[in-house]
Amino acid sequence: MTEEEKLYTLALTRIGYVNPEVMLRLYQEVGNGKEIFAHRDDLTTIIPDCSQRLREVVGCDWNDAIAIAEKEMEFCNDHGISILCYGDENYPQRLNDCPDAPVALYYKGNADLNRKHVISIIGTRHCTSYGIDTIRRFVSSLRTLCPDVLIVSGLAYGADINAHLQALDNGFDTVGVLAHGLDTLYPQSHRDTARRMVSQGGLLTEYMSATKIDRINFISRNRIVAGISDACVVVESASRGGSLITARIAQEYGREVFAFPGRVNDKYSEGCNNLIRDNRATLITSAESFVETMGWHTDALLAKAQSHGIERELFPDITAEQQHIVDALQRFGDLQLNTLLVKTGLPISNLNQLLFELEMAGVVRPLAGGSYHLIM
């Protein structure tokens, strides 16, 4: 994407409020903000069923939005912030599965957002000693079982900050998804942790600098926490709260949702217990059960074998078309069927047959939620 296309894409996010799903569909149909600007007066030629509201928003005067976008690009350039637009190689590819993914993200950090394994660890802001200890044991054990994991959370009080701290202390990269621009930090008490994360993970947001800290933004950012991950782990939650919203969104996106159970009378275990009771989350008690359910134990066994000097077995003979699938899973990790369609360019009928053949050959394994995992 050229700098000019990037400029107009950022401006697109400032021309007026448009539902994220509608915005993404428009962006997907047209390709980038510059082309949308070029067709601002004839959107119906691209999207025949375009609503009157969308035509009015896109057809407005873009001058102010472009000026804001220019200022933001300058700010990002001065502060080492990457602008990730939908469709870019470095844009979090797992968000491609999400119908309301942001068309632009701002990222300061060094972690690969398309790491093979990504999990979000979330929970109440009123984390108890039980929750803190659960996060510590989970992350510590995960380091031994599956070390190549990116841990995501929201850098909030409670479960979030403990997830980030345990990730840092155990050598994991960790990314905080923020509800404001990268010119500030909330809460400010987490500033030291955020600085550590920039060099061992990163900070990610869909909001420009100078964005007002607003409650609705925290709710909106939950979809990124859910969508950027393969699995969502809820540690503690009351009967209502942001972590339950994130868990619901993750389930809607087809992500795996897990919850640690708690005592029936504990206020901050009620939400987790309800998720498990209603079959909206899988009960886990340890990192071992999590890794086993996700099918990541094969990676742990491989790492152990390689550490003892045992060479990885070669793939069985596979066709060129099957290799496309293997290459996609090697690069991006576990993928759902619709994402594999995009990554491989194979027709759906062929893809289903090829996946079946690879499964029979012991190369891939289907996971709950419709994802496929590369075994070898």
Image (cartoon, grey):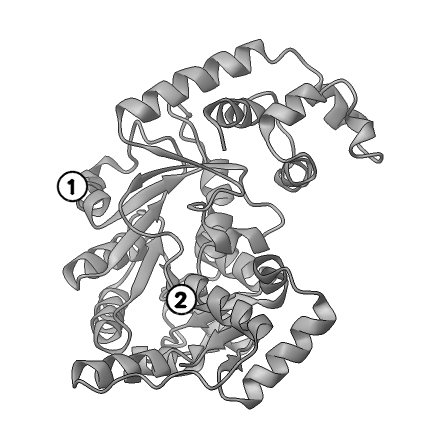
Which residue lies at the image location 61% right of the left edge and 22% below the top edge?
16
The amino acid type of the residue labelled 1 equals Asp
Which residue lies at the image location 46% right of the left edge and 52% below the top edge?
242
29 with respect to 309 (left or right): right
Which residue carries the number 2 mark?
Answer: 233
The image quadrant where one finds the C terminus is bottom left
Quarter of image, res 42: top right
Q: Viewer-proximal residue, 27 or 276?
A: 27
Which residue lies at the image location 33% right of the left edge and 21% below the top edge?
75
Quarter of image, res 43: top right
Which residue lies at the image location 44% right of the left edge and 69% below the top edge?
272
Q: Is residue 228 visible?
A: yes
Element type where label 1 sits in the image:
helix
Q: Viewer-proximal residue, 341 or 99?
A: 341
Nearer-N-terminus badge (2/1): 1
Q: Position of residue 54 (x, y in %)?
A: 73, 27
Element type where label 2 sits in the image:
strand
Number of the label disc, if any, that sits on residue 192: 1
